[in-house]
Amino acid sequence: MFGWFKKKEIPKEEEEAAFTLPLPNVKAGTSFLGPSLLISGKITGEDDVQLLGRHEGSIDLDGDLAILESAVVSGRIAARSLSVSGSVEGDLLARKKLLVRRSASISGTIATPTALVEEGAFLEGKVEMDGPR
């Protein structure tokens, strides 16, 4: 009866490619903060960062940030693109795009123009999606 209104099927590979961050393919200038580290304070810079440990404080990057599954972050986060697989308590600003993996747990306000949230991810708070920032 409503055959004319079919959702366009997008292959999973194309959908994931649209939200893939370059972080897993490590490029020059990528910084790694290991799983046994506890960092307190402010992290700023232009490079990409992969965070595996704990961070208490703010993060403000011109590059991309991957918060991996083992990571626990408490504080305000801002980056060009964000990929979250770990735990975050605080506000997030992804200037370009946000990818929330199924293992992620986020409590706080999220602001981004584009987001992909995988089934199973935990989000508590508010999501603001405006145009590019």
Image (tube, helix red, strand yellow):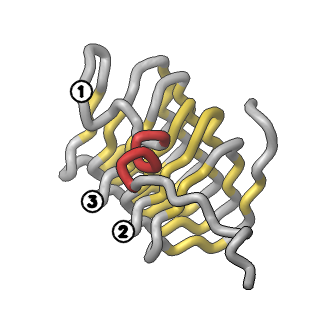
> Looking at the picture, how far across and down is residue 12, in whole percent?
39, 55
Q: Secondary structure under badge 2?
A: loop
Q: Which mark is residue 103?
A: 2
In-image side of 112 versus 79 (left or right): right
Residue appearing at x 48%, y 24% in the figure: 63
Residue appearing at x 54%, y 22% in the figure: 62
- Residue at mark 3: 70
Sooner in the amino-acid sequence: mark 1 or mark 3: 1
Outermost residue on the top side: it is 28
Residue neighbourhood size for the residue with mark 1, other residues' Cα within 10 Å, grouped as few (<14), some (14–19), many (≥20):
few
The quadrant in which the C terminus is found is: top right
Task: State yes or no: discs 1 and 2 in contact (Cβ < 8 Å).
Answer: no
The kind of residue tagged 1 is Val
Q: Secondary structure under badge 3?
A: loop
Task: State yes or no: discs 2 and 3 in contact (Cβ < 8 Å).
Answer: no
Residue neighbourhood size for the residue with mark 3, other residues' Cα within 10 Å, grouped as few (<14), some (14–19), many (≥20):
some
In-image side of 122 versus 39 (left or right): right
